[in-house]
Image (cartoon, rainbow, N blue to C red):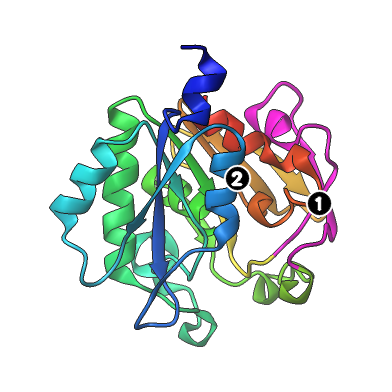
Amino acid sequence: MTADRAVARGRGPLVAILAGRSPADRYSLHRGYVEAIWAVGGRAMIVPAGPGADDDQVLDVVASSDALVVSGGGDVDPAIYAAAENHDAATIQECDPERDALELAAVRQATASGRRVLGICRGAQLLAVASGGTLVVDLPGAGFAGHWEYERQHEAVHGVEADPKSGASAALAGVTRVNSIHHQAVATVGPDLRATAWSVDGVVEAVEGPGQLGVQWHPERLAAAEPRHLAPFSWVVA
């Protein structure tokens, strides 16, 4: 059987996509994640991560997959990282500590076992925290405007520049502008990651390390109009 026929029959790599809760009584995931994985020849498996999920069962499911995607969502709990005592609680959005704990465990497990991990928006921030990094708790409060553009979530709204030859540069695939739906961002990365892309005002837009790539933008919401945004999903499936 040829590789193309194997993919067509649903035998591509199995990618676990962690989904959060929004609203509180539902698990939720933007359909673009699943469609992007399908488009690049993978098989998507949606895995709930949050209250009500059995941690061991979820980790077993993740362990059965070939790769992991950590999706967007609410803020990572500041209590996990060094900025915990230096923030205004009123700026925190949809914090879910149980989801944080489960996703941190899943990322560390996947990385330790050699599976690729793609983090998108909140997912990129979670990769940084999992590696010992910290976040900018509130970008507007820190003087960075123009990063919460929810009304234009399917449009490229600001420029981004990546280190040449980096995974972030490959993930951009020549694109120079991205969408932006976040009020937090990576401040520092731990020893296993490095920042490799930035917006025009200096906000970190990508982090990466061995087997890990985190992008602050939402390629799953841009790929329908611009197929080059499938590149991060091609990377995780590969």
The correct choice, above or below, for 192 with respect to 198 in the image is: above
Residue 170, magenta (yes or no): yes
Residue 210 point in image, percent of width and height? 46, 25
Q: Residue at x 77, y 37 (%)?
A: 228
**Range of the magenta residues?**
153-180
Per the image, the residue denoted by label 2 is: 36
Q: Is residue 237 visible?
A: yes
Q: Residue at x 52, y 24 (%)?
A: 238
Residue at the extreme top of the image, as rendered? 1
Q: Secondary structure at mark 2?
A: helix
Per the image, the residue denoted by label 1 is: 225
Give the CA distance from mark 2 to mark 1: 12 Å
The image quarter in which residue 197 lies: top right
Q: Residues within 10 Å of mark 2 (few under 14, many from 20)?
A: many
Q: Nearer the viewer, residue 115 or 199?
A: 115
Instruction: Tell me which amino acid carries mark 2.
Output: Ala
Q: Residue at x 60, y 34 (%)?
A: 40
Q: Secondary structure at mark 1?
A: loop
Residue 60 point in image, percent of width and height? 18, 43
The correct choice, above or below, for 19 with respect to 194 in the image is: below
Task: State left or right for residue 151 relative to residue 194.
Answer: right
Q: Earlier in the sequence, mark 2 or mark 1?
A: 2
Q: Is residue 120 visible?
A: no
Q: Residues within 10 Å of mark 1 (few under 14, many from 20)?
A: few
The image quarter in which residue 176 lies: top right
Task: State left or right for residue 225 relative to residue 214.
Answer: right
Instruction: Tell me which amino acid carries mark 1.
Output: Ala
Q: Nearer the viewer, residue 225 or 165?
A: 225
Residue at the extreme bottom of the image, as rendered? 90
Residue 188 point in image, percent of width and height? 53, 48
Q: Nearer the viewer, residue 33 or 81?
A: 33
